[in-house]
C-alpha cells in the first residue's frame, strides 16, 4: 500500500496514521472510525489518507499488518503446560489492559461487521498462531508430544475459551479461567487428541 | 416487558415483532435493525413497538428471551465424548444453516457493539450452558467424571474453538474441527483438568 522506508517521510506518515487509527478505535470503536477523524488526529492531509488507505477497512488492514510484524514474546519455560499458561495469561492481560484492551476489542468488533476487516484479522491470527506454535514444536522436540500434533490447534484450544467469554458469552475471565483453558489444551495435546 | 398470554393478542403481537426482528437481523444485521423496519415488517404499529420494545436493544433482548425458553435437544448417547460431539456439531450446523446462521451471527455481532445486547446474550448463554451441563451431570452419575467437574466449563471448552474460528480468527470450521474440540474437552474433563 505504501512503500516503507524506515525513518523516511513515508514511514513517519504511515506511523502517524496508524497511531491515530488505534486511538480512534480505542475511543470510538469501529463505527466511529473515519478517514476524516484519522486525518485530523494524525495531522496528515485528508486527501493523502483517502488516497493511501481508502476507508476504515484500509486503515484497519494497515494497522493489523504493522501489528503482525511486531515482536511477540513467545514463552520458553521448558514445559508445554507452563508455556500455554503464559500465552493464555498474555491474551487475558492484553484485553484487560486499559490502553491495549479496547483497541484489541475494537479489531474483533470491526471484523464481525466488515468482511475486509475480517480478512485482515484472519491474516493477523494466522501469523500469530504460527509464532505461538513454536511452544508446541519445542514440546515435540523434547518428546512431550507426538510429532503428529496440530500445533495451531493446540494454541487455538488454549486461548479460545478466553475469547469465547469475552466476545460471545460476555462473561468475566479470571486468571484461573485462563490457566484452566491452557491446562485443558496441554492435556488434550499430551493425550494425542489434538 | 409484555404480559404473555399464550394465544392471546399480546402473545401474537410479541411473536410477530420477534419474527420481524429475526428477519431484519438476518437481512440487514444489527446495524440495520430499527424499530421502524420491524414495525413495517410485522404490521404492528410503530408507536406500539416503540412503547413496548423501545429500541434495537429491546428488540434483541426480547428475541433472545424467547429463544432461551425454546426446547433445545440435549443429547443423551450414554457417552460424554459422543454427547459433546453432538453439541459441537449442533453449534457448527446452526451457524452453517442458511436461515438460522445469519440470525445467530447477528446476535453475536450485536453484542460486541451494544452493552444491552451483550447482557441479553450473556443471559441466553448462561441458560444454554445450564441446559447443556446435563450431559456432564449424567457422565458424573455414570462414574465417567469426578463430581468436582465444572460442568459449564466442559461445555465452554467443547464449543469455544468453534466460536473462536467463526468470530475471532474468521477461519472455516470443518466437522472434524468441531469433533476435535469436543474430544479435547472430554479428555480434559476425564483427566480432571476442568
Image (spheres, coloured by chain):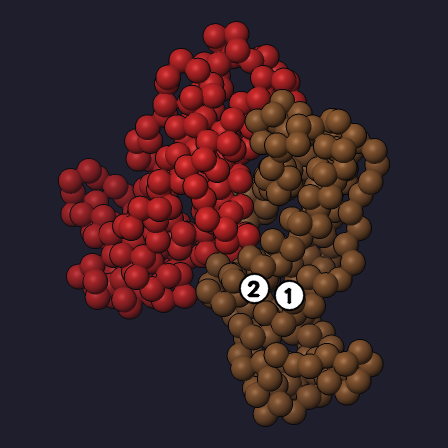
Chain colours: A red, B brown
Same chain, labels 1 and 2: yes
Viewer-proximal residue, B190 or A31? B190
Q: Chain of mark 2?
A: B
Question: What residue is shown at x 29% (from left), y 50% (from top)?
Answer: A98
Residue B14 quadrant: bottom right
- Proximity of marks 1 and 2: CB atoms separated by less than 8 Å: yes
Mark 1 to mark 2 CA distance (whole Å): 7 Å
Question: What residue is shown at x 67% (from left), y 52% (from top)?
Answer: B128
Whichever of labels 1 and 2 marks the residue nearer the N terminus, that label is: 1
Residue B25 quadrant: bottom right
Viewer-proximal residue, B134 or A31? B134
- In the figure, is residue A20 to the left or right of A194? left
Q: Chain of mark 1?
A: B
Q: Which residue is mark 1?
A: B64
Instruction: Check disc 2: other Cα within 10 Å, few if <14, some if 14-19, many if 20+.
Output: many
**Residue B84 percent across, percent down from the top left:** 72, 37
Vertical placement of residue A29 versus A78, above or below: below
Q: Secondary structure at mark 1?
A: helix
Question: What residue is shown at x 48% (from left), y 14% (from top)?
Answer: A139
Q: Which mark is residue B103?
A: none
Whether residue A114 is visible here, answered yes or no, is no
Q: Secondary structure at mark 2?
A: helix
Vertical placement of residue A62 versus B36, above or below: above
Q: Which mark is residue B120?
A: 2
Question: What residue is shown at x 45% (from left), y 56% (from top)?
Answer: A110
**Residue A181 percent across, percent down from the top left:** 52, 33
Vertical placement of residue A55 versus B96, above or below: below
Where the C terminus of chain A falls, by quadrant? Answer: top right
Viewer-proximal residue, A44 or B169? B169
- In the figure, is residue A177 to the left or right of A94? right
Amino acid at each position: 500500500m505504501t512503500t516503507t522506508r524506515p525513518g523516511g517521510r513515508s514511514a513517519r506518515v504511515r506511523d502517524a496514521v496508524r497511531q491515530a487509527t488505534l486511538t480512534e478505535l480505542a475511543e470510538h470503536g469501529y463505527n466511529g472510525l473515519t478517514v476524516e477523524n484519522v486525518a485530523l488526529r494524525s495531522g496528515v492531509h485528508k486527501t493523502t489518507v483517502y488516497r493511501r488507505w481508502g476507508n476504515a477497512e484500509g486503515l484497519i488492514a494497515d494497522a493489523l499488518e504493522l501489528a503482525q510484524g511486531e515482536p511477540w514474546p513467545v514463552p520458553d519455560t521448558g514445559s508445554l503446560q507452563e508455556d500455554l499458561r503464559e500465552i493464555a495469561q498474555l491474551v487475558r492481560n492484553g484485553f484487560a489492559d486499559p490502553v491495549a484492551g479496547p483497541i484489541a476489542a475494537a479489531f474483533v468488533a470491526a471484523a464481525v461487521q466488515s468482511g475486509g476487516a475480517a480478512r485482515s484479522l484472519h491474516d493477523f491470527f494466522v501469523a500469530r498462531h504460527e509464532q505461538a506454535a513454536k511452544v508446541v514444536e519445542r514440546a515435540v522436540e523434547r518428546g512431550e508430544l507426538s510429532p503428529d500434533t496440530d500445533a495451531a490447534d493446540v494454541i487455538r484450544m488454549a486461548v479460545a475459551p478466553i475469547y469465547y467469554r469475552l466476545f460471545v458469552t460476555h462473561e468475566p475471565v479470571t486468571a484461573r479461567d485462563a490457566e484452566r483453558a491452557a491446562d485443558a489444551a496441554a492435556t488434550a495435546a499430551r493425550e494425542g487428541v489434538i
